[in-house]
């Protein structure tokens, strides 16, 4: 697995956030992929794109993914990284993620399992 292939998937996600294009974001996920966002059940299929559309509808206008480490095990790659999501110039969320990538029949890589959580403090209950 070329690191550049995985970085290109992150760049596609970043472009999708900047262009407010949930379809582009969802294109990094392979068939049978599972998204495990905070505060949600596991999402699959069309629910992945719907989740990202909800993120965009909430006002997210950009983001960044930083690959921290990458391991390859045959047709499986494990990525650890950090992310940031913005509304304009303001950081709306930052955190960490793990993505398990699967090599596709065409030789390309796609997200298979995607789990992330915020590193920002949560509000204390009233």
Image (cartoon, rainbow, N blue to C red):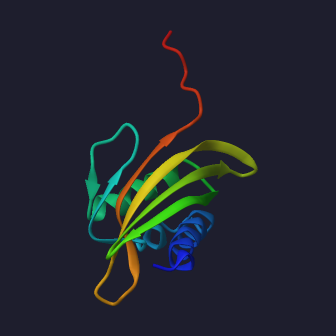
Relative to 68, 26 lies left or right: left
Residue 7 image point, x, y percent: 56, 72
Residue in front for this viewpoint, 90 or 101:
101
**Does 101 sit above or below residue 116?**
below
Q: How many marks?
A: 0
Residue at position x 51%, y 73% from top? Answer: 6
Q: Quadrant of residue 19?
A: bottom right
Residue 55 image point, x, y percent: 49, 51
Residue 74 image point, x, y percent: 32, 76
Residue 64 image point, x, y percent: 63, 59
**Does 26 sit above or below residue 115?**
below
Residue at position x 52%, y 39% from top? Answer: 118
Q: Quadrant of residue 34?
A: bottom left
Residue in front for this viewpoint, 60 or 115:
115
In the rendered image, the residue lying farthest to the left is 32
Residue at position x 54%, y 54% from top? Answer: 81
**Does 39 sit above or below residue 46?**
above
Relative to 86, 38 lies left or right: left
Relative to 89, 8 lies left or right: left
Residue at position x 54%, y 73% from top? Answer: 12
Residue in front for this viewpoint, 12 or 3:
3
**Does 74 sit above or below residue 90?**
below
In the rendered image, the residue lying farthest to the right is 89
User: In the rendered image, which quarter contains the N terminus?
Assistant: bottom left
């Amino acid at each position: 697995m070329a690191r550049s292939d995985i970085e290109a998937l992150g760049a596609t996600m970043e472009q999708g956030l900047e262009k407010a294009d949930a379809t582009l974001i969802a294109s990094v996920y392979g068939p049978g992929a599972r998204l495990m966002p905070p505060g949600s059940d596991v999402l699959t299929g069309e629910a992945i794109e719907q989740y990202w559309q909800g993120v965009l509808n909430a006002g997210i206008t950009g983001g960044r993914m930083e690959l921290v480490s990458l391991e390859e095990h045959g047709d499986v790659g494990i990525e650890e990284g950090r992310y940031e999501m913005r509304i304009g110039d303001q950081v709306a969320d930052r955190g960490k993620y793990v993505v398990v990538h699967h090599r596709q029949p065409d030789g390309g890589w796609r997200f298979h399992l995607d789990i992330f959580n915020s590193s920002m403090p949560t509000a204390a209950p009233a």
